Amino acid sequence: MPAPEPPLLHADMLTTAEALIPVLRDRADEADKNRRLSDDTLADLRAAGFARLLQPAAFGGYEMGFPALVDVLSTIGRGCSATGWVLGQYCIHAYMTGFFPPEGQHEVWDDDPETFLVGVLAFPAGRATRVDGGFRLSGRWSFASGIDGAKWCIFGANLLEDGQPPKPWLFHVSLSEATQDDNWYTSGLRATGSKDVIVDDVFVPTCRTLD
């Protein structure tokens, strides 16, 4: 059975989230116009530590449970639904990173344990082949919500091996090795910045991959 959430930490998180509601409401129209969250909002989320709710404690995360996550996201969403959605992406992909090999987790978090992480898990959108020490990854994925504030992305792709059916696989890649296509023009949730992201024959070491 998982350890219970620290009640004071849970309460403090909610207090901080509630204080941000009017701030996010004031910023919502501008974020919608710009089709991304503002740098100020990203800084507020980072300062509050919200994206670390499910992060492993070994990297300074809080390892809180999903009830705390839902409470914080629903509170933030009262101020700005797009901010709530993006924060959810950051939290969930930090949680997923905790399942990758420890060496890969260190590569992601050692330089910046508070970094924001996103993910695009449409496996047919990418293809990977196995090479010495890792994989080569290529593809184009849609709906990378929150990518403007992130440094890393988890990509879902099909691993292609001779004589075998495609296998769904996960790849953690620095966004410095990817290209963003600013094509997020929609009628709703514009501030999520859910653009396409492209990877072209990037090497990913085995430690940053997961079956």
Image (spheres, helix red, strand yellow):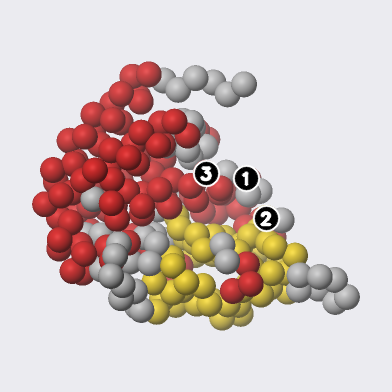
Q: Which quadrant of the figure has residue 77? A: top left
Q: Secondary structure at mark 1?
A: loop
Write the residue at 55% across / 54% down.
107
Q: Amino acid at mark 3?
A: Tyr
Q: Are marks 1 and 2 in contact (CB under 8 Å)?
A: yes
Q: Is residue 130 visible?
A: no
Residue 1, above or below 86? above
Under circle 2, the secondary element is strand
**Residue type, numbered disc 2:** Leu
The residue identified by callout 2 is 210
Q: Quadrant of the C terminus?
A: bottom right
Residue with the mark numbered 3: 95
15 up-or-down from 174: above or below: above
Mark 1 residue type: Phe
Give the distance between the C-alpha atoms of the residues marked 1 and 2, in whole angstroms. 8 Å
Residue 45, compared with residue 137, is above or below; it is: above
Q: Residue furthest right?
A: 163
Position of residue 3 measured from the top left corner of the image (x, y, whole percent): 54, 21
Q: Where residue 102 sits: x, y (%)?
A: 63, 45
Give yes or no for contact between labels 3 and 2 (Cβ–Cβ under 8 Å): no
Residue 148 in the image, given as x and y percentages of width and height = 33, 65
Residue at numbered disc 1: 99
Q: Is residue 196 left or right of residue 100?
A: left
7 or 80: nearer the viewer: 80
Q: Residues within 10 Å of mark 2 (few under 14, many from 20)?
A: some
Question: Observer-nearest residue: 115 or 140?
Answer: 140
